[in-house]
Amino acid sequence: MPLADRAYDALLLQVIGGERPPGDWLNIGALSREMGLSATPIREALARLEPTGLVRRNPLRGYEVAPLLSPAEIVQLMDARLLFEPTFAAAAAANATPEFLAQIMETIESMEKTGEHSDAEALKNSWIADERFHTLISFQAGNPFSRRAFEGLGSQLQRFRLSGRAGRTHALEAAHEHRDIYAAIARGDSETAAALMRAHVEHARRRTLTDERVVAEATTAH
């Protein structure tokens, strides 16, 4: 594995596993010593993490783990997703190919294997599969302009997922919803695909806000 990939995977797991909490400064020198790597692959890994929204760069101080989204920001982000994703699902149903259907089924099966495990590796695998499901549908919709506009939300999607941090991935529940969307797309039912995608995004928002509330209540209790 290339050194930058090794550093990227290690940092990603540390962030999503809670070893590096929001606000934690990511000193390149310290990370180099900790991982036994030179500064160059560490810098490359941090630069790759920045677009995910999980870390952010301060021009004066370097990189830090980004703060979690607030409940209001979660609502706003999901409202923005609702502008795109039902339309993408409808268009994908009209443009579905066997290769595309096989690809999105792979993502569903991957999420089902992840189950409801709460370890960092399970979280990472679940998020990768979830993101690929939605990305594949956005490409299959066939409109490069709306797809590029949707990609602008990408830097916030990982932060959204990390905000649901009550120790669950919700992978099985989300995978069940993905299967329903897949079935509608596979039979070319654009109207149902759009409705199911809208419901899925709204359910994801509710799940994350519920997790936020659980964590906030637990924190207050302590």
Image: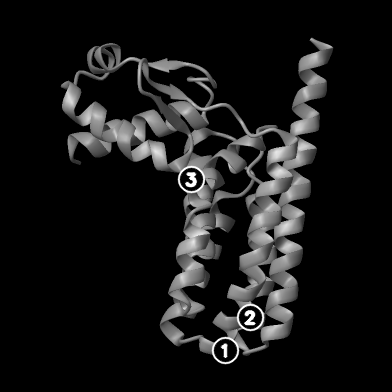
Q: How many numbered marks appear?
A: 3
x, y percent for residue 166: 70, 32
Pointer 1 with pointer 3, Cβ within 8 A: no
Sequence-earlier tag: 3 or 2 = 2
Residue 116 versus residue 50 in the image, above or below: below
Residue 164 is left or right of residue 110, and the answer is: right
Looking at the rendered structure, which numbered label has been put on residue 155?
3
Residue 221 versus residue 75 in the image, above or below: above
**Element marked by disc 3:** helix
Q: Residues within 10 Å of mark 3 (few under 14, many from 20)?
A: some
The residue tagged 1 is 94
Quarter that holds the C terminus: top right
Q: Residue at x 51, y 32 (%)?
A: 16
Q: Residue at x 44, y 29 (%)?
A: 56
Amino acid type of disc 3? Ser
x, y percent for residue 85: 62, 67
Q: Residue at x 63, y 89 (%)?
A: 187
x, y percent for residue 136: 47, 69
Residue 44 versus residue 38 in the image, above or below: below
**Element marked by disc 1:** helix
Pointer 1 with pointer 2, Cβ within 8 A: yes
**Element marked by disc 2:** helix
Amino acid type of disc 2? Ala
The residue tagged 2 is 90
Alpha carbon distance from label 1 to label 2:
7 Å
* Residue 181 or residue 150, whichever sits in front: 150
Alpha carbon distance from label 3 to label 2:
24 Å
Alpha carbon distance from label 1 to label 3:
28 Å
